[in-house]
Image (cartoon, rainbow, N blue to C red):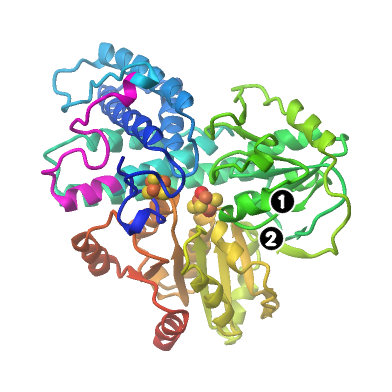
C-alpha cells in the first residue's frame, strides 16, 4: 500500500505497511481500485455532459458516496468496498454503452474483479494507487493527488447536501470532469494547477448548497449555551457531520427517555432551531475525534458515527457502536440509508435504554455555540463600530481539523496568546483545542465565536466578504488572518476554495502535506503567500506587527 492523503501519514512521507489510521493494506487496495473505477466513471459521465445529456441521479449519488468512502477515517470494511466496486462496474458498463469508448484515456474502461480475494490479487498496474507509474513527474503526481484529495473532500460535502435535498448539477458536472482529468497522461503542471483552482471554486458552490440545505431544513444557527458535562440517564452520542441523521434520531427518541449528546463535528448541530427544539438534545460529549477511544471506553450508552472520523473501536465499546451512511468497520452494526424514508434507529435506542446511561449528574459546565454567518452578520453594525473605535484590533480564523500528532498545541497557545482586543472565529474540530477555555469577551462579544463545522468555512468566507464590503476594502486588506489546521481531505478542498477565491497569507499547520513537493510548495508560497505555521509568538508578531 501507499497512502499519504492525510496529515498523520507515517513519517510524514507515506503509510506503506499499515495506515497510522488503522487502514489495512487490503482496505487500501480496495480503495485504490474503487478510485480507479470512479476516475473512469468520471470520464464517461463527462462525455455524456459534453453530448448535452444529464448524469442520472443514481450515478451522481454513487460517485459522491464511493469517493467519500475512501476519505480518511470513514470506511474500513472490505465487504462494503466490494459492494461499491461491483456497482461501479455496472454503472461504467452502462455508461460505455451510452457514450462509447473510442477516445477514452487508458484504463478508463477498467473493470474490477468481483470478489475480495480477486481484487486483492490484482497486480500493480498503471493508474492504480498513488505510485502507479514510477516515471511520472513528481510535481504532476503531487498536483494530481491534490486534485483527487480535494475531490474526496468535496464528495463528502456533496453527499451531506444530497441527502438533505441539496442536489446541484454544477457540482456533479464539476466532480465528474475533474475525476476524468486525473486519468490523462499528457496533463501539465499548469493545467493541474488550474484544475485545482476550478475545484476550489466548485467546492465553494458545493458548500453553499450544503449551507442552504442545512439552514433551509433547520433554520440559521443561533447563539446557544450547550451543556458539556454528563447528565444522569440513558443516552446516545452522535458523531460526524450529518445533520439529517441527527434530526431523524431526535424524532425517533422523542418521549423515550434517551438523552442525545453531540460529539466532535456534530457539536454545532445543537445551535439549529429545528434541532435544538428537542429538549433532550442536551449537550456535547467529549472532545475532538482523536480522543474517542479513551472517551468511549466502557461508555454506558450508544454511539452513532454518521461520517468521519472513526477510529479503530476498542472491544469495550464495539458492541454499542453503530455506523451509518458511508461509515463502516467490520463487525460493527450498520444502519442502512433509506432514500426516502427515515433510517431505523430502534435497535440502538433500545440498547441505550438497556445500558442505562450515566449514574449521576456532573457539576454543570456550558459553552456557547452557534455563531454561524447569520448570527455574526446580524451584529455586523456593532462589529464594524467596535473595529472603528479600536476595540477590536484583529480577527483570526483559527479553524480546521484536530489530530493526534504532537505540535497541535500551537492552536491552543495561539488562542491563549492572542491579545485581548482580538476575536477568534473558529470552525471544525480543531476548535476543541481551545473552545472550553474561558477566554472572556471582546467589545461585548465572546472572544471565541464558533461558526460551525468544517463545511461552514462557507459561512466564514461570507462573513469575511461582508466585512470587506462594509469596510469598502479588498478582503485581503481586512484585519483578518487565517490560521488553518489540516488533517484530512475536506481540509484540502477548503484550502483550495480559499486559494481560488484569492484569500492570501494563510498560515497552514501543524505540518505541511506530504503530497506537496518542494516545487509545488514554492508555487503556493509565491502565488498565494501560503506559509507554514511557526510558533504562536512569531506568527502573532508577524501578523499584528504588520498592521
Ligand atoms: Fe474533523 Fe474528522 Fe470536519 Fe474532518 S472530525 S477531521 S476536516 O473529518 O471533517 O473537522
Ligand atoms: Fe496513512 Fe492517513 Fe492514508 Fe490512513 S489515511 S493510510 S493514516 S495517510
Residue at image position (70%, 36%) is: 320
Looking at the image, can residue 150 be seen? yes
Where does the image place residue 516, in percent across and percent down from the top left?
27, 57
Q: Quadrant of the N terminus?
A: top left
Judge whether 222 appears above or below 52 on screen. below
Q: Is residue 511 left or right of residue 343?
A: left
Where does the image place residue 317, in percent across and percent down from the top left?
68, 41
Judge whether 462 appears above or below 219 on screen. below
Residue at image position (62%, 62%) is: 450
Mark drawn on residue 369: 2
Seen from the viewer's position, the closer of residues 150 and 306 is 306
Q: Is residue 491 left or right of residue 334?
A: left
**Whole-Å distance between the Cαs marked 1 and 2?**
8 Å
Q: Secondary structure at mark 1?
A: helix
Q: Secondary structure at mark 2?
A: strand
**Magenta segment boundaries in residue numbering:** 118-145
Q: How many marks?
A: 2
Where does the image place residue 420, in percent across and percent down from the top left?
61, 84
Q: Is residue 327 left or right of residue 362?
A: left
Residue at image position (64%, 48%) is: 266
Q: Where is residue 431, by image quadrant?
A: bottom right
Report the residue marked by disc 1: 270
Q: Are marks 1 and 2 in contact (CB under 8 Å)?
A: yes
Taking the magenta stretch, the answer to whether it contains residue 314 is: no
Residue at image position (36%, 20%) is: 117
Judge whether 245 appears above or below 473 on screen. above
**Overall secondary structure of the magenta section:** loop
Where does the image place residue 24, in percent across and percent down from the top left?
41, 38
Amino acid at each position: 500500500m501507499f497512502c499519504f492523503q492525510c496529515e498523520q501519514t507515517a513519517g510524514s512521507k507515506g503509510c506503506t505497511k499499515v495506515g497510522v489510521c488503522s487502514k489495512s493494506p487490503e482496505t487500501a487496495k480496495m480503495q485504490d481500485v474503487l478510485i480507479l473505477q470512479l476516475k473512469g466513471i468520471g470520464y464517461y459521465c463527462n462525455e455524456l455532459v459534453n453530448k448535452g445529456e444529464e448524469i442520472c441521479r443514481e450515478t451522481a449519488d454513487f460517485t459522491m458516496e464511493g469517493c467519500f468512502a475512501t476519505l480518511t477515517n470513514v470506511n474500513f470494511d472490505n465487504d462494503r468496498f466490494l459492494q461499491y466496486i461491483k456497482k461501479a462496474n455496472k454503472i461504467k458498463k452502462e455508461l460505455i454503452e451510452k457514450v462509447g469508448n473510442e477516445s477514452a484515456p487508458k484504463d478508463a474502461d477498467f473493470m474490477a474483479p468481483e470478489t475480495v480475494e480477486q481484487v486483492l490479487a490484482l497486480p500493480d498496474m498503471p493508474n492504480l494507487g498513488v505510485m502507479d507509474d514510477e516515471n511520472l513527474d513528481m510535481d504532476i503526481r503531487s498536483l494530481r493527488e491534490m486534485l483527487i484529495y480535494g475531490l474526496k473532500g468535496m464528495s463528502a460535502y456533496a453527499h451531506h447536501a444530497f441527502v438533505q435535498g441539496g442536489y446541484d448539477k454544477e457540482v456533479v458536472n464539476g466532480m465528474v470532469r475533474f475525476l476524468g482529468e486525473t486519468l490523462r497522461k499528457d496533463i501539465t503542471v499548469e493545467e493541474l494547477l488550474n484544475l485545482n483552482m476550478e475545484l476550489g471554486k466548485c467546492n465553494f458552490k458545493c458548500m453553499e448548497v450544503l449551507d442552504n440545505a442545512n439552514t433551509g431544513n433547520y433554520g440559521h444557527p443561533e447563539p446557544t449555551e450547550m451543556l458539556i458535562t454528563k447528565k444522569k440517564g440513558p443516552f446516545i452520542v452522535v458523531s460526524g457531520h450529518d445533520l439529517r441523521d441527527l434530526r431523524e434520531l431526535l424524532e425517533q427518541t422523542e418521549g423515550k427517555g434517551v438523552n442525545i449528546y453531540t460529539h466532535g463535528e456534530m457539536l454545532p448541530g445543537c445551535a439549529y432551531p429545528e434541532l435544538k427544539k428537542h429538549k433532550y438534545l442536551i449537550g456535547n460529549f467529549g472532545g475532538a475525534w482523536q480522543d474517542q477511544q479513551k472517551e468511549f471506553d466502557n461508555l454506558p450508552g450508544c454511539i452513532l458515527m454518521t461520517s468521519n472520523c472513526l477510529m479503530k473501536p476498542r472491544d469495550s465499546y464495539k458492541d454499542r457502536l453503530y455506523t451509518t451512511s458511508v461509515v463502516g468497520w467490520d463487525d460493527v452494526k450498520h444502519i442502512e440509508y433509506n432514500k426516502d424514508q427515515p433510517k431505523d434507529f430502534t435497535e440502538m435506542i433500545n440498547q441505550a435504554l438497556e445500558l442505562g446511561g450515566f449514574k449521576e449528574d456532573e457539576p454543570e459546565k456550558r459553552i456557547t455555540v452557534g455563531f454561524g454567518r447569520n448570527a455574526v452578520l446580524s451584529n455586523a453594525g456593532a462589529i464594524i463600530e467596535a473595529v472603528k473605535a479600536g476595540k477590536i484590533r484583529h480577527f483570526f480564523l483559527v479553524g480546521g481539523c484536530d489530530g493526534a500528532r504532537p505540535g497541535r498545541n500551537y492552536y491552543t497557545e495561539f488562542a491563549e496568546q492572542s491579545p485581548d482586543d482580538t476575536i477568534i472565529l473558529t470552525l471544525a474540530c480543531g476548535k476543541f483545542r481551545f473552545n472550553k477555555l474561558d477566554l472572556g469577551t471582546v467589545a461585548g462579544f465572546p472572544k471565541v465565536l464558533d461558526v460551525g463545522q468544517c463545511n461552514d468555512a462557507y459561512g466564514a468566507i461570507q462573513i469575511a466578504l461582508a466585512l470587506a464590503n462594509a469596510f469598502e476594502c479588498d478582503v485581503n486588506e481586512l484585519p483578518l488572518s487565517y490560521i488553518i489546521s489540516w488533517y484530512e481531505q475536506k481540509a484540502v478542498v477548503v484550502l483550495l476554495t480559499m486559494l481560488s477565491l484569492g484569500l492570501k497569507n494563510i498560515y497552514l499547520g501543524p505540518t505541511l502535506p506530504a503530497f506537496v513537493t518542494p516545487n509545488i510548495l514554492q508555487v503556493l508560497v509565491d502565488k498565494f503567500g501560503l506559509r507554514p505555521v511557526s510558533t504562536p509568538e512569531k506568527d502573532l508578531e508577524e501578523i499584528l506587527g504588520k498592521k
